[in-house]
Image (cartoon, grey):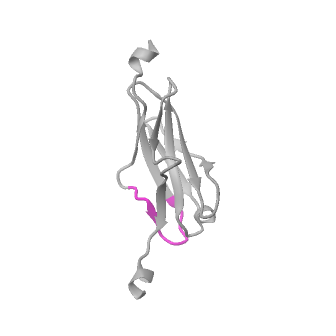
Amino acid sequence: LIAQLDKEPPQVVLRDGYLLEYSRGTVSELSFRATDDYQVKDVKLLARPPGGEFRDLPLETTRTGYSTVRIDPSFHRNGTVELYVVAIDLSGHEGYYGSPAKPLQLKRKQGFERLIR
């Protein structure tokens, strides 16, 4: 029965109002929405700090399907963080936002420094 109801992989999108950028020395907060034709079982975010390896970062997921992560300055070190999100449904289908091969990039805003260069 689940196979009939759950034919498609989950879809993951960046929540409106959230950007893949942050200001120097601040916490970056990102929020994603995962949906499925039946039910999302799990959502994970993997991120790689500058010069590091991918790590699973804890997401806070609400009943409405929003998953939010806080990336501290101790993790991003004011550099570019590569990341991707994977959502898994009850049938084991996986849906991605970014991917291990083509991760998204969370970048530091280049405001005043860009103007003086």
Which part of the image, by quadrant, shows the C terminus? bottom left
Relative to 97, does residue 92 appear above or below in the rendering? above
Which of the pair 116/33 is nearer the observer? 116
Residue drawn at 60 percent across, 60 percent down: 49
Q: Magenta span has 27?
A: yes
Determine the residue located farthest toward the bottom in the rendered image.
116
Q: Position of residue 84 (x, y in %)?
A: 50, 48
Relative to 25, does residue 3 appear above or below in the rendering? above
Residue drawn at 48 percent across, 29 percent down: 93
- Image quadrant of residue 109? bottom left
Determine the residue located farthest toward the top in the rendered image.
1
Q: Position of residue 67 (x, y in %)?
A: 48, 43
Which part of the image, by quadrant, shows the N terminus? top left
Q: What secondary structure predominates along the stretch shown in magenta?
A: loop
Q: Position of residue 22 (x, y in %)?
A: 47, 65
Q: Magenta span has 88?
A: no
Residue drawn at 53 percent across, 57 percent down: 82
- Image quadrant of residue 17? bottom left
Q: Position of residue 85 (x, y in %)?
A: 50, 45
Residue drawn at 47 percent across, 59 percent down: 105
Q: Is 38 on the left-hand or right-hand side of 68?
A: left
Relative to 92, does residue 64 appear above or below in the rendering? below
Q: Which residues are magenta?
A: 18-28
Relative to 112, does residue 77 appear above or below in the rendering? above
Determine the residue located farthest toward the front in the rendered image.
101
- Image quadrant of residue 53? bottom right
